[in-house]
Amino acid sequence: MAKNMKTIGVLTSGGDAPGMNAAIRAVVRVGSYHGLKVMGIKRGYNGLINGEMVQLEPRDVSEILQRGGTMLQTARCLEFKEEAGVKKGVEIAKVFGLDGLVVIGGDGSFRGAKDLCAAGLPTIALPGTIDNDIDCSEYTVGYDTCLNTVKDAVDKIRDTATSHERCSVIEVMGRAAGYIAIQAGIACGADVILVPENKWSFDEDVLRPILESKSRGKRHSIVVVAEGIGGVIEMAKEIEEKTGIESRATILGHVQRGGSPTVQDRVTASEMGALAVELLLAGKQNRIVCLRDNKVTDVDIEEGLAMKKELPQRLVNLAKQLAI
Ligand code: ADP
Ligand code: F6P
């Protein structure tokens, strides 16, 4: 055990994701197993700055494994982007006797974790976001649950689109990342998938495939659009005007962020939470727990944040081939 590691904190930050609770539970239980005192910090970095934290014992995290959301609440804390905010966080951590911290969130939260390490609080970052957009990790907790939620919704939309022989334009989450769009789109047999990573034109990439699908005898069209592209209501109108095919738009929205986590999210979150604690116990800090070559491992935060996660273009091409 690291000489001074007696008390650790855990917080969730940024957009919530199903499986965050499973990760909190793993940090609390594995920490307790190793004799650590674990403090649950409320509302992300806001709670650290304001000293909003309570001790969590193993029984305090009962009945959360199967729940979406985060029992600690989450927030986006602007103050923490400033040096003074980080300094305050480290001071409050000292007041509460925190020797280490686990931050569950996305890449913004990881920048905060890096700043905390530099300011003197050993911190480990754990990827929790539905976007699957953490460069150094093949997987982020929440992604699989989100994909299944989208799959269920699009399957239902497809039923009614077929009955009415309509085109359905569906917006899924992902401001800068097209992972949800491409994988859910393939899983749901979308005719068109638009992702923020790739250039597209309305005539070539939307109209043409819809008209071709129709001429090949398809009775509906499914267009999946990532949030970063937006404009699905106008797009549905334009499709109707230019093709004569009745069209409807659906914005799936925050339904994609909730729900009971899948097995993959529960197990990955549990493994990642355990490794985060083990790293702190081993005296390590400034690390991101991640999935690489399908194994839960860790990388340096700066190295991890500098990596560039590409959207697999083979999936983009596959989606087009499957849509004929
Ligand atoms: P996510 O972690 O899901 O990417 P955000 O980008 O909103 O979500 O970041 C969550 C929080 O992390 C922010 O509200 C802020 O408190 C902190 N954060 C974001 N960027 C930085 C940064 N560059 N330096 C320090 N903290 C940051
Ligand atoms: O980062 C997760 C995410 O759900 C993105 O996919 C989406 O763009 C964003 O958060 C939405 O954030 P908010 O909760 O502020 O609506």
Image (cartoon, rainbow, N blue to C red):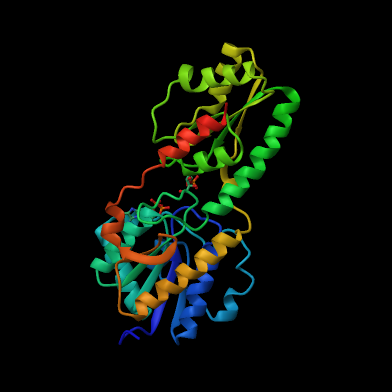
> Could you tell me which residue is drawn at 76 percent across and 26 percent down?
163
In this rendered view, identify the residue nearer to me: 199 or 24: 199
Q: Where residue 7 sits in the image (x, y, percent)?
A: 40, 81
Ligand 1 sits in which quadrant? bottom left
In the picture provided, is 164 more to the left or to the right than 108? right
Where 85 falls versus 173 (above or below)?
below
Q: Is residue 214 among what the camera can see?
A: yes
Q: Position of residue 249 (x, y in %)?
A: 61, 28
Q: Is residue 72 above or below residue 16?
A: below
Residue 41's spot in the image, x, y percent? 45, 69
Rendered image quadrant of residue 247: top right
Left or right of 237? Residue 204 is left
- Number of numbered discs: 0
Residue found 57% across the figure and 47% down from its top: 147
Give the residue drawn at x 25%, y 72%.
120
Residue 257 visible from this viewpoint: no
Residue located at (51% from left, 22% from top):
206
Give the quarter of the figure containing the N terminus.
bottom left
Q: Is residue 258 above or below residue 166?
A: below
User: Is 89 displayed left or right of 215 in the figure?
Assistant: left
- Left or right for 314, reference 259: left
Q: Residue 121 appears in which quarter of the rendering?
A: bottom left
